[in-house]
Amino acid sequence: MPNPIIYDLMAARPELLVLCMAMAILILDLFLGYANRYVSYVLAQVTLIGAAILTVAHHTPGVSFAFNGMFVHDPLADVLKLMILLSSSVVLVYSRAYLERSGMYRGEFFALTLFAVLGMMIMVSGSHFLTLYMGLELLSLCLYTLVALDRDNARATEAAMKYFVLGALASGMLLYGMSMIYGATGSLELAEIRRALLSGSPDHAVLILGLVFVVAGVAFKLGAVPFQMWVPDVYHGSPTAVTLLIGSVPKFAAFAFVIRLLVQGLEPLAIDWQGMLIIMAVLSIVIGNITAIAQTNLKRMLAYSTISHVGFLLFGIFAVSINGYTSSMFYIAAYVLTTLGAFGMILLLSRQGVEIEQLDQLKGLNQRSPWYAFIMLLLMFSMAGVPPTLGFYAKFAVLQAALQAGFVGLVIFAVLMAVIGAFYYLRIIKLMYFDEPADITPIKPTSDVAWVMGINGMLVLLIGLMPEWLMELCAYAIAQSVE
Amino acid sequence: MQQMLDTNILSLSIWVPILAGILVLFTGDDRNAHIARPLALIGSLSSFLVTLPLYFRFDKNEGDFQFQEGYNWIPSFNIHYHLGVDGIAVPLILLTSFITVIVVLAGWEVIQKRVAQYMAAFLIMSGLMIGVFSALDAVLFYVFWEAMLIPMFLVIGVWGGPNRVYATIKFFLYTLLGSLLMLVAFIYLFHHTHSFELIDYYTLQIPLSVQIFIFIAFFMAFAVKIPMWPVHTWLPDAHVEAPTGGSVVLAAIMLKLGAYGFLRYAMPIAPDAAHYLSGFMITLSLIAIVYIAFVALVQQDMKKLIAYSSISHMGFVTLGLFIFNELGMEGGIVQMISHGFIAGAMFLCVGVLYDRMHSRQIADYGGVANTMPTFAAFAVLFAMANTGLPGTSGFVGEFLVILGAMQENFWFAFFAATTLIFGAAYTLWMVKRVFYGEVANAHVAALQDLNRREVLILGLLALMVLGFGLYPAPLTEMTHATVTHLLSHLAQPKLPGTI
């Protein structure tokens, strides 16, 4: 038996790497001149890739606990960490040119991003209310700061304030709910709570009150209606590189948060939270899709589209079955891959002095660059859920899970709303393909961005043609980790 | 090679045009249009040649699926890449690959803007439509069904007329709405059979109330596509705005997909509901035949007139399918193929005029026969075929359907037969106003007759229309065994406890 401390630390090797490197970058950056900033960038990339390799090398199929049951190491955590690390790496590639242009190409950006990644990794591995909460707060604090990083930008500062105030409120609610559940069950550890619930002794009234607060906190982090107010403002106000980060990677962590809290901890109360999730899912799809139609700002439109995607995601969760959770995980993976591409495209098309903000700026993209127009077309059809793109299988998976659970009416409602949703994605394709360009400057991304974007776009199509491996990966992660 | 051709002929039929389309895309912008055009022609011709063995190697005495191939595609949901065709699908596949060649030729000079993308869209669409006709797995079918909307959406939107955006978005959303309900029906069936194989659905017992819901879900998908009255309103818009090639594919093939969907999915999966709702379906078909013919009569725009005439003719197809006898069903299938040639040819004729005059208004023409005699000969032939003149393919289908309807109910046949009058009225009246009389204006006087490319295209189609009109046996022989097989399946109730 090795030393327990060593054992605990070994279980969290990727997290430790990210933590050490984030601090190293923070210190190192003090000694780097502007000309040598690329060192921070390269180090951040090396960290993310290194942590990803560690995660894979370190992977074992079983479930094991560390730090006295506060930290869990299971396939769900490993798969989600791998996805978080790889997509964060893509985020950095897409952001670099933007950061250079807007004066944010500084060590702080990379250090904060790495700390945010660390927060997400802790959330993904949390098996205790405290670890989950700590991970969430680490992530949130980094994101608040990142939104405000461009400090002379009034809109970004406003967005950061809104995000912070509402986020703090949500965290408060979450803590309050956790404390009530603690009061009723006598434990903060998810497995213990589950056991206490199954034994049937806890006071049901207190539990339900606690559950409501927890669900509200979770819904805020996901951006589900009626806790969606911050989403459009933050997406719109943040520097686009930060929007890219906020809009994509943390969804993995939020998904893990839902699985850990509601499924692994509170599944015995599923009958109670199921109803709440149904209401949130329905409202999210309606409000997200209908409000998105009215948007003229691309970032705001994608924000409302995110809200509707969260609604679809919840269809898999409220099915309360292994099939449903697997489908939701597949949905989130498809969603993040598509969103990375969409915001990445906004960054790729922007250049010094011309930031893509309005839908109209996409006009005639097919004439300027057929290749990028085609990728954007794939991304939009994927979001609309049209085969043969990845997004179709994502919608297919969650809908079949909900139908299996017997929600025929809700599924029909969801597909009708998907038709409304298709309209605003089609409008982007219309602008790119049917209209004449107003601006005919050639698009010249750097070669790394061009390659990553090409791969990202082709993956949306190729996984759409061959979705089996991703489905199997999600099924494996869920089946091994959720009883 | 021979081995591969025998076992993978359907895969080849699907993927050859798609890969050719991707290859055409790689020729880049319009500076390379002179490469893109021949490449597209080679692609479409090889796609046509690849599909030909389907006809020659088909066993005409067998009513079941042939040329089957299957791989386990998505094991998580038990989805298979399963292809196979019967006597109904083969003629439609051949029609698709044939029309694609025509469309590539028709766009040769007319399309000067983004040539490679235009040609590629049609080649890819052709592969996807062949996929729809040969898929035997519900999800595979659905993927092809939806994917083919994408190229058509772009074709109408990029190369279409002034109101193209409205028309193409309406087209897309209408079709998407119907298809998504069909998807829900497929998922429902999946949870009862744990399979997406069509064969498994054929034998599944379903209570009548559920069958009706499933049938309605399919109805939403297929009726929009055919289109049946009252969900037809997207079609005139899409036709008017689409470029000629788009209209041809839309009329010749896409409309057939809906009827094919009824034959392959809605009717065999929910036969009791199909019988139960046959009165409803026949009523809608008769309304389409009679009422839409009146609507066609008052059109000022030639393309719109032909679009309404298509809806009216497709009413014959659905009528033939839902009277559940052999004459009606075979007539419906013949009508599908024949309408593919005739409607395609009619739209090409309008395209010929539009390329020269940039107008589709009947009022802008008059006396075209004086300046374009060869063209007028072709146009009058196709117009006659459209009215169902004996000796053309249009006659065979309509006649069989009317005979079939007569066996069922005199009044069905009576209303269906009125089309022979109204169809003749709107078509011939248009022909009279456009082609005969005095030369209407200086523009008409300056018209040039057909060039060799146009003669080739219209000549090929005229050959088909006359060929099937005089000797329809190759087509009916092919479908006969399948229709008998299908009707015997439809006659067996699938309600629980009846088998």
Image (spheres, coloured by chain):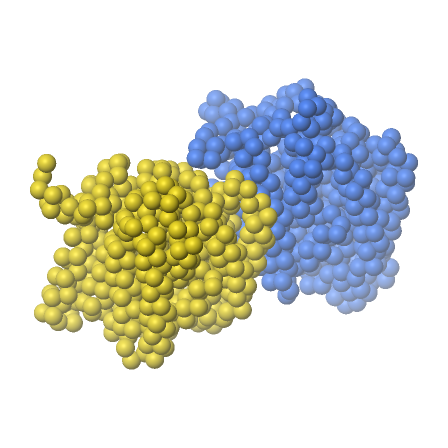
User: Quick one: which chain is blue?
Assistant: B
Which quadrant of the figure contains the N terminus of chain A?
top left
Instruction: Give the total of numbered labels.
Output: 0
**Residue A301 x/y as whole percent:** 47, 65
**Residue B2 x/y as whole percent:** 49, 22
Name the residue: 55% across, 42% down. A406
Which quadrant of the figure contains the C terminus of chain A?
top left
Question: Is residue A258 positioned above or below A73 on the image?
Answer: below
Name the residue: 87% across, 59% down. B437
Q: Quadrant of residue A209?
A: bottom left
Left or right placement of residue B370 versus residue A79 in this view: right
Name the residue: 60% across, 25% down. B65
User: Quick one: which chain is yellow?
Assistant: A
**Residue B185 x/y as whole percent:** 60, 40
Left or right placement of residue B326 versus residue A286 in this view: right
- Residue B34 in view here: no
Viewer-nearest residue: B152 or A269: A269
